[in-house]
Image (spheres, rainbow, N blue to C red):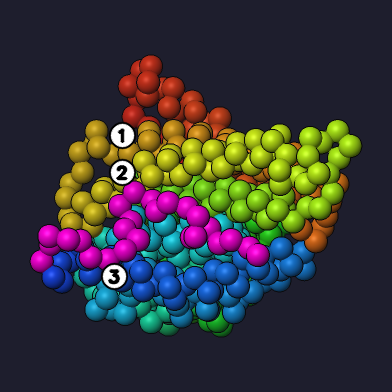
Amino acid sequence: MMTTTSERRAPLAGSPATAGTPGRPADHPADRSAARFVQVRERLDPVFRSIASSAAAREADRIIDRDAVRRLAEAGFTSLRVPVEYGGAGLSFAQSAELIVELAAADSNLTQALRAHLINQENVLGHPDAAFRDRWLRRLGAGAVVGNAITEVNNAVGEGTTRLVQDAEGTWRLNGTKYYSTGSLYADWIIVAAVDARGEEIAATVPADAPGVRLLDDWDGFGQQLTASGTTVFDNTPVDPEEVYTSGLDDGTRVATGQASWQFLHLATLTGIAEAIVRDAGDYVRGRRRSFSHGVTELPRDDAQVLQVVGELSSAAFASRVALDAVVTALGGILEREAGGEVLPEEDVNALYVRVYQAQQVIAKNVLAAATQLFEVGGASATSQSRRLDRHWRNARVLASHNPLIYRARIIGEWEVNATPPSRSYRIGSA
């Protein structure tokens, strides 16, 4: 029987698993938060179990399961951070991080597909415009899901050909083609990057079913195949003036929309993959009834060498969790301060980015190695397409390739040797 990740793993730092603390007044805010965490986790657990049980089959058949995302939304996953008064769970950043990792362990495709949504949630919480904040918190609390259409082939953000301009009647119209539109096939709203009539960077949110929007599942990567990271076409799509923005993309000015936050989601997803590797290795070894002539026991589950491999996989997952904990603690604190209107000292933001980039080196390398070592626990049967254990390496490799490790390692080295502040903005298309 499959053991869920939530039954085995220790909570991330700052995410209590039970409510109530002796010696504290009844109805203390921390206890209310802990109680909400327990409640939402109980709602999500059967959804996570269902997703995990069908993950290999869905990947084998390339099934974009919109129903799975809808069930996650109905159980509260897409509004974990939304305040209770807006219909959300009102969880802390650390509490939400724990549940993000658990979804990633069930199916890393879905965590990646919801990456833009989860980042937008932090953007909304700390947004300086009260009207924007209220409008979007209501949407998110009601279960709306957000995808993205930011990147174009061979172009950087702000250098693309997608245009958002006003026509002769004053209606905003969106025209262009985007790729790497992660999550948009699952979404109700799409965040779009474009340029205006003057060539200046501009952004908008449009309903996924708006006129002129066409979504294609043509992502051809060998991993993360169910993230709907394909092409989005906008053909004279009308845009509500209220949904047009001149800022808010990753320009390095806000942590909530910057690389520290975007990379955190990759690291949480990779950590979930590490948990899934340990889970699947254990399930595979427990179920094996044949050993090898040069094995040391009748059953692989009793073989000291096989158990050593599983122990090493578990340790790799532990290292990933510890590194992620460090990011969660640092990033959660910074996001809270930023949302409170504090002007963050440069040294604090620099320290955060260095920590995130360091964790990237630790987590990505550990998980990729574990995804290969996994196959040492068994023979050819471990490579069966029905198990699709290879998906863990493929998915981890694609996630780790988004922001190449070599560049981030160099940035850390520049910081250590020359005290060069770490780069915060990340754009594809030009140096």
Residue 193 seen = no
Coordinates of residue 430 in the picture (x, y in percent): 54, 40
- Disc 2 and disc 3: Cα gap in Å? 24 Å
Q: Label for residue 351? A: 1
Which residue occupies the foreground of this view, 237 or 44?
Answer: 44
| Amino acid carrying mark 3 in the image | Ala
Q: Secondary structure at mark 3?
A: helix
- Disc 3 and disc 1: Cα gap in Å? 33 Å
Q: Secondary structure at mark 2?
A: helix
Q: Label for residue 35? A: 3
Q: Is residue 4 magenta?
A: yes
**Residue 428: quarter of image:** top right
**Span shown in magenta:** 1-25
| Amino acid carrying mark 2 in the image | Ala
At 38% from the left edge and 82% from the top edge, which residue is drawn?
A: 142
* Residue, disc 2: 330
Q: Secondary structure at mark 1?
A: helix
At 30% from the left edge and 52% from the top edge, which residue is drawn?
A: 14
Q: Are marks 1 and 2 in contact (CB under 8 Å)?
A: yes
Give left or right: position of 270 versus 15: right
